[in-house]
Image: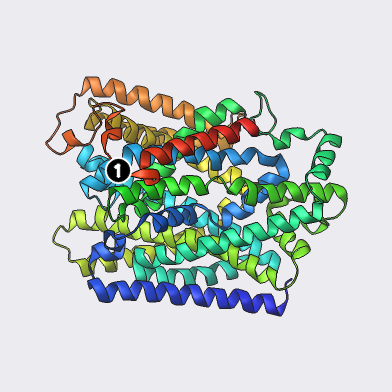
Amino acid sequence: MISTTDIIISICYIAFIVGLGFWAGLSGKKKEGTAAGEYFLAGKSLRWPMIGMALFATNISCLHLVSLAQSGFDTGLLAGNFEWMAAFTLILLALFFVPFYIRSGVATLPDFLERRYNRACRDWLAIVSVVSAVVIHIAFSFLAGGIVLETLFGINMFTSIIAIALVTGAYTIVGGLRAVVVTEAVQTVVLLTGAVIITVLSWWKVGGWQPVMQVLQEGGQMDKLSMLHSSGDPSGLPWYAVFLGYPVIGIWYWCADQTIVQRVLGAKDENHARTGALFCGFIKVLPVFIFILPGLLAYVLYKQGHLDLEVLRQGDGELHTKGIYSVMITRLVPPGLVGVLVAALLSGLMSQISGALNSIATLVSYDLYKRNRPQATDRQLVKTGRIAAVLALFLSIGLLPLLNRYESLFNGINDVISHIAPPITCVFLLGVFWKKASSVAAQYTLWIGSALGAGVYLIGKLYPINIPPLMVAFYLFTVCVLLQVILSFAFPMQHTAESGRLYWESPLAPLRVKGWPGLANYKVLSTVLLLVMAVLYWVFR
């Protein structure tokens, strides 16, 4: 339980964010009226710093704070691959996907698929995107937030989740993307500040790097400091799964998922969109050191006898480490600062949910409602989006008992993504890089690939198999690529004037755009980011 002072700090923070969200959304409304473009895409006025921070805030939720700390405790730095590998896919987003998204002026990624392929592809991606946003971005985040708030405040998990849903949904549904992005920029700063505080306190309590090395050496756990594990590693995440499987889920998540990419679609121009994506890539270096490392330090403190985790020991006698982050807050952080840490957790939770709600509203309004009612007014589109966001909140809360069965939240979310991503990654990659990728082939690849992913997921739950989720993603992706290539030759593409402009003639074509001069140039930033990631992987190999 936490002190009254910390509770007051947390409540004041929530009130501030809600007020800021309403102010940002309503000020934009006064400026632009009720235009759908202002509500869903912030009037295409976003600059690169806000895009980068909003991308990071939408990605890093309370789920990540909780699950990455748990992964740090259980397996060390290994889960950091999901953070550092993201930098490579953000480079792909900036170099190869952003130009088409911005130049075509699309409001949603399903809209892009219709222009490159056909309407059937648009419809299917819209449905899958809404479902994935509800399950992955909202329901799992609610679950993580509920676990933390129940541990800290002693409030029933569902009660706290409903309260957060009400306050976050209020300013998001009223204010649109402008409210989401403005609040996410603030929440990124708060989230990072809170994460740094608990990292520094954990490091100080452990006593530095030498005690960490000593505990890991004595326990034969030195592999906890390695990012790349060998084949047959008990963690289920060998090095080849990282390099083969992560790109499949990473390209879907960072380049083809509406919840994430919508921040880029609201960019002022192509340069701001590209630089914003790369800026997020640099920020993604941090989570390993401020989200995962604290979990590893908690493991060391536990082995030293300086951290009591009996509260996590359940009836079976085993430690259930889902609540490790909240225990660290209550055991390691002094009163006053606990409120800041709770605010950071709430920042992650609220930013993830608000971003997903706005994306769901956009998808339902543009890709489902407007398609059936082409003459719909902006007011009708905004109203439809708001209704969809409210329904999404109720549906995500209803999924919580099912998702709570996963022992590890981090493994749970990656398991779900690994079965959703392959067909979508396939049709986007081939569509952008291969002229002959046909609309009929893409359509059937999405349908068959999604059905195959769902089937494999269900079979895996009934008859568990010992295959890492990332490798499942790679195998499914391979099948989807073969299917789309074969069908593209069987049903050749007949390009329209528009679709003929939505693929690259060669991989070097995107680099011919000049971009901004100096260090802000997207080519320079991409090169620097690649070098930084290469050095980090060499150090923590």
Q: Secondary structure at mark 1?
A: loop
In percent of width and height, residue 210 lies at 82, 42
Whether residue 105 sits left or right of residue 3 in the image: it is left
Quarter the C terminus occupies: top right
Amino acid identity at mark 1: Gly
In the image, residue 435 lies at what x, y percent? 23, 27
Which color scheme does this rendered protein use? rainbow
Question: In the rendered view, does 345 fall on the left or right side of 510?
Answer: right
Please state the horizontal and vertical placement of residue 406, each as a whole percent of the image.
62, 47
Q: Which residue is mark 1?
A: 515
Front-most of 369 and 290? 290
Residue 126 picture location, percent across and down: 32, 48
Residue at (35%, 65%) from the top-left corner?
178
Q: Residues within 10 Å of mark 1 (few under 14, many from 20)?
A: some
Q: Nearer the viewer, residue 320 or 230?
A: 230
- Relative to residue 186, is residue 209 depicted above or below? above
Q: Residue at x 28, y 56 (%)?
A: 268
Q: Which quarter of the picture shows residue 183?
A: bottom left
Where is residue 394, by image quadrant? bottom left
Relative vertical location of residue 454 with respect to residue 392 in this rendering, above or below:
above
At a point 30% along the width and 43% down the height, the residue shown is 515
Left or right: 363, with 202 as reference point? left
- The answer to whether one can see residue 371 in this image is yes
Q: Residue furthest front?
A: 518
* Quadrant that contains the N terminus: bottom right
